[in-house]
Image (cartoon, rainbow, N blue to C red):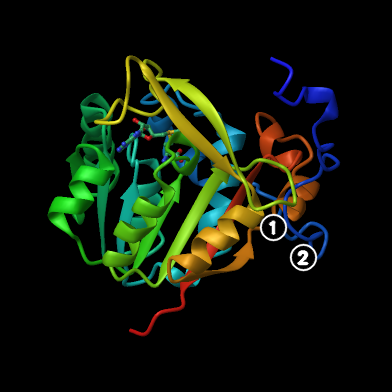
């Protein structure tokens, strides 16, 4: 089809480096000796989705070390809570309570078992269902939303942020694949619903394929601003990768195809 732009004529991709500015952290200060998941090894067994030790431990540092002040006393919503890996991390970071929403019931079962094993105080609740349907009907009120590994599994970004805003959350941590371009664009992709880590079918799905969109950082910034939030900063993946050179299974962060972003509410309390 001649009107479709061929790949070689497309805008060249930026050079391979982590998204965000170069690290300002002193060399060695981001070294991980023992990560969160080394003390919670059940999570290596209860997921088939990127449950590699270095990857999980560095993602933990990029969220819970960098934004440690958000969690003490907070009510947290964990979108696409999977096997409960980040719900537990939030509670251990001091959160008062966590609600996880996850579409795959078997993963909800794993999450409940994992948190029962590691978190005897029972300050968690996991809801099995489509995040859009659950947030439309249950309207939880929270302080912090974790939107980790989900944004690029949907094209319903504005709807998702509308629902997030309706929770009254002051902070949203987004960890997402990003398309590498300076333009505020969303790159479409199709995704099969069979894989555990992928989108699930919904009312807009035809067959077994979901249309998804991977935003650029500029698109993420625009999405945040038009939905009442502002991008505050990006996690320091440059420093984490510099200080942990033996880390593997994190090429997407290394080349800037994935980022961890803190957004804060710009609307009045
Ligand atoms: C790539 S995994 C991310 C898991 C975890 N949040 C993380 O960052 O490590 C995506 C998760 O989203 C879930 N999911 C996909 N579509 C969903 C939907 N519409 N509502 C709720 N969960 C969904 C999948 O079942 C899967 O557990």
- Callouts 1 and 2 close, C-beta under 8 Å: yes
The residue depicted at 21 percent of the width and 28 percent of the height is 105
Query: Residue 158 location in percent, x, y?
Result: 41, 54
- Mark nearest the camera among 1 and 2 is 1
Work out whether 32 lies above or below 191: below
Graded by Cα atoms within 10 Å as few (under 14), some (14 to 19) or many (20 or more), the crowding at tag 2 reads few
Query: Residue 161 location in percent, x, y?
Result: 38, 57
Query: Residue 179 location in percent, x, y?
Result: 66, 40
- Residues 134 and 142: in front is 134
The residue depicted at 19 percent of the width and 46 percent of the height is 134
Work out whether 201 lies above or below 147: above
Sequence-first tag of 1 and 2: 2
Q: In this orientation, does residue 49 appear?
A: yes
Name the outermost residue toward the bottom: 268
Q: Which mark is residue 87?
A: none
- Residues 58 and 266: in front is 266
Quadrant of the rendered image holding ligand 1: top left
User: Pointer 2: what residue?
Assistant: 25
Say which element carries label 1: loop
User: Pointer 1: what residue?
Assistant: 236
Q: How far apart are marks 1 and 2 (CA)?
A: 8 Å
């Amino acid at each position: 089809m001649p009107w479709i732009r061929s790949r070689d004529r497309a805008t060249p991709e930026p050079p391979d480096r982590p998204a965000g500015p170069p690290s300002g952290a002193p060399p060695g200060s981001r070294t991980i000796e023992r990560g969160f998941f080394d003390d919670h090894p059940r999570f290596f067994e209860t997921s088939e989705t990127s449950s590699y030790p270095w990857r999980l431990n560095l993602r933990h540092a990029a969220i819970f070390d960098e934004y440690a002040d958000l969690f003490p006393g907070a009510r947290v919503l964990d979108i696409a809570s999977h096997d409960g890996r980040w719900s537990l991390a939030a509670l251990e970071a001091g959160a008062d309570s966590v609600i996880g929403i996850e579409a795959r019931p078997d993963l909800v079962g794993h999450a409940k078992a994992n948190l029962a094993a590691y978190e005897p105080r029972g300050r968690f609740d996991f809801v099995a269902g489509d995040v859009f349907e659950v947030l439309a009907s249950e309207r939880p009120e929270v302080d912090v939303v974790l939107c980790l590994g989900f944004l690029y599994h949907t094209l319903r970004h504005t709807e998702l942020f509308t629902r997030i805003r309706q929770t009254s959350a002051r902070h949203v941590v987004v960890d997402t694949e990003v398309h590498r371009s300076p333009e505020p664009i969303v790159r479409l992709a199709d995704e099969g619903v069979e894989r555990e880590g992928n989108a699930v079918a919904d009312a807009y799905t035809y067959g077994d394929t979901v249309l998804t969109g991977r935003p650029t950082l500029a698109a993420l910034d625009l999405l945040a601003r038009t939905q009442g939030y502002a991008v505050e900063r990006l996690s320091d993946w440059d420093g984490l990768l510099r200080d942990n050179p033996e880390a593997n299974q994190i090429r997407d962060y290394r080349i800037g195809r994935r980022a961890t972003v803190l957004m804060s509410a710009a609307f009045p309390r």
